[in-house]
Image (tube, helix red, strand yellow):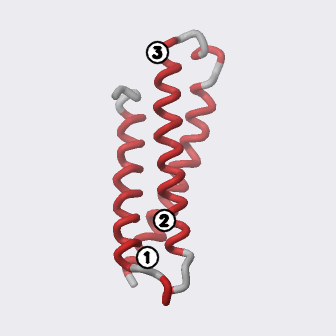
Amino acid sequence: RPVFKTATEQLIECRRVLKYTYTFAYYMHSPANTNNPNMESQKERFEHHQEMLERFTENLSELSEKPLSEMDRTDVINQTRVVDRFMKNVLKYVDEGMEE
């Protein structure tokens, strides 16, 4: 059962990170940034990363909502790892100034 606890904790953490990415994205679209051509490509990359994190988080959520009898432990473990890795990459991307 620790696998399912880990998956649930990962979902909570990812949703918390996503919550802040929406605020971050909002400020990226502020008027001060609209005339910066470099910022436009950064916004696009950031929104792509955000969308992928949403997708992976949603996949893990769907896996974890299945009845235990239908749940594939290996799928849950693999998806939890993917989500964790991708979330850390999104945070690193933001922390490092969104450079490629």
Which residue is disc 2 drawn over?
A: 60
Q: Which picture quadrant has residue 75?
A: bottom left
Q: Which residue is depicted at the point 43% across and 77% down?
A: 4
Residue in the foreground of this view, choosing between 17 and 39:
39
Q: Position of residue 95 (x, y in %)?
A: 38, 34
- Say what amino acid the circle numbered 1 marks: Lys
In this rendering, the answer to whether 95 lies above or below 68 is above
Q: How many marks?
A: 3
Secondary structure of the residue carrying tag 2 is helix
73 sits left or right of 55 in the view: left
Secondary structure of the residue carrying tag 1 is helix
Q: How busy is the neighbourhood of tag 3: few (under 14 within 10 Å), some, or many (20 plus)?
A: few
Q: Position of residue 55 (x, y in %)?
A: 52, 53
Q: Which residue is depicted at the point 51% across and 42% down?
A: 50
Q: Which mark is residue 73?
A: none
User: Which of disc 2 and disc 3 is earlier in sequence?
Assistant: 3
Which residue is disc 3 drawn over?
A: 38
Q: How busy is the neighbourhood of tag 1: few (under 14 within 10 Å), some, or many (20 plus)?
A: few
Q: Which mark is residue 5?
A: 1
Q: CA distance from mark 2 to mark 1?
A: 12 Å
Residue extending farthest to the right is: 31
In this rendering, the answer to whether 51 lies above or below 74 is above
Q: Position of residue 45 (x, y in %)?
A: 46, 31
Q: Position of residue 68 (x, y in %)?
A: 49, 86
- Say what amino acid the circle numbered 2 marks: Leu
Q: Which residue is depicted at the point 48% across and 65% down?
A: 60
User: Which of disc 1 and disc 2 is earlier in sequence?
Assistant: 1
In this rendering, the answer to whether 6 lies above or below 100 is below
Q: CA distance from mark 1 to mark 3?
A: 41 Å
Location of the N terminus by quadrant is bottom left
**Disc 3 + disc 2, Cβ < 8 Å:** no
Location of the C terminus by quadrant is top left
